[in-house]
Amino acid sequence: MKNTQKGFTLIELLVVVSIIGMLSSIVLASLRDARSSATKAAGLQFSSSLLHTIGAYALGYWNFNEPDTDGGAGVSAAAPQDYSGNNLNFSSAVNRTSNIPTKSGFAASSPSIIRTLTASEWSSIRPSLDGYTFAAWIYPTAVSSGSNVSPVVVLDYSPTGTNRPAIYFGLSSTQKVVCGDAYLDWATGISSVEAVSMNAWAHIACAYNGKYSLYINGKAASVTGDQAATSFAGNNGQAISIGRSNASSSWVYTGYIDDAAIYGESLTALEIQNLYAASAAEHGLAVK
């Protein structure tokens, strides 16, 4: 008897293989989308958690994301608002940039602003300054020359007979992170051994709890200077400055600043690492 059973032809096999390939591509794409959504959700959850912990310490927080005022035609200037809840808002506008890899917002562009503090405002934040942290994302495009500082965030005052910042936080002329209290001596404070790269985003922080510590991109930095120097931050506070200081007209910051903050606690190394991790990706850096 003749066997009439037929197998698959080559064309039929190729059709089946191509269909399987298409289905596999759809499944893999769905998995990638699901993984991306889960990562974003985890990031939002982490940021929310961070806001409720570290954010509770904030004395002042400026992210420069105020609404665009030119109808969306470009990046407009805006007066930075304080999102810490302490209403330390600036009245002067700063130019802004959208030169942030994945952030749907702005950063300040070479800001030079000062916000005078009333006596009650200073007294309300003064008790917390026995331990404090300054932090910001920076993208320097130039630095001041000589012994001048390129200030990022400064608490200014001018006691009788001197004109010095209470606490200065910024970059030296050699691109080192510097932080200290110049009430008695300009040399009071510390400098990082490592230099910050020009034309690139970096997260920097300075914490004080009886001694100074510096952090670059979430990691503790090796430092030079007097880490145990006494801070006199409570004396005669007059103003908060971003990108400048009353101390000297030569103290000028050139470049971008984002997420500038003053915290009323000396943040731990882990908290500063988490602060970096929360927005490293949007500034084009890997979480370490």
Image (cartoon, rainbow, N blue to C red):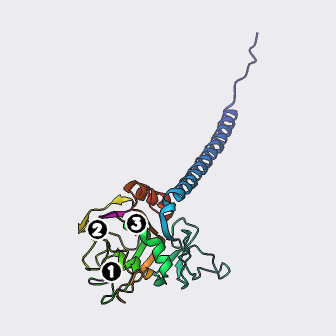
Q: Could you say which is closer to the camera, residue 145 or residue 78?
A: 78
Contact, mark 1 vs mark 2 (Cβ under 8 Å): no
Q: CA distance from mark 1 to mark 2?
A: 13 Å
Looking at numbered disc 1 in the image, what kind of residue is underneath it? Val
Magenta residue span: 209-217
Q: Is residue 17 left or right of residue 148?
A: right
Q: Could you say which is closer to the camera, residue 252 or residue 26?
A: 252
| SS type, badge 2 | strand
Q: Residue at x 40, y 77 (%)?
A: 154
> Per the image, is 279 magenta?
no
Q: Position of residue 180 (x, y in %)?
A: 31, 73
Q: CA distance from mark 2 to mark 3?
A: 16 Å
Q: Which mark is residue 149?
A: 1
User: Residue 201: in sight, yes or no?
Assistant: no
Label 2 neighbour load within 10 Å: few <14, some 14-19, many 20+ = many
Q: Residue at x 48, y 69 (%)?
A: 59
Looking at numbered disc 3 in the image, what kind of residue is underneath it? Thr
For residue 199, which quarter of the picture? bottom left
Q: Which mark is residue 212?
A: none
Q: Residue at x 28, y 72 (%)?
A: 189
Q: Which residue is mark 2?
A: 192
Q: Upstream in the sequence, badge 1 or badge 3?
A: 3
Q: Position of residue 29 (x, y in %)?
A: 62, 47
Looking at numbered disc 2 in the image, what kind of residue is underneath it? Ser
User: Residue 46: in sight, yes or no?
Assistant: yes
Q: Could you say which is closer to the camera, residue 205 or residue 86?
A: 86
Q: Nearer the viewer, mark 2 or mark 3?
A: 3
Q: CA distance from mark 1 to mark 3?
A: 18 Å
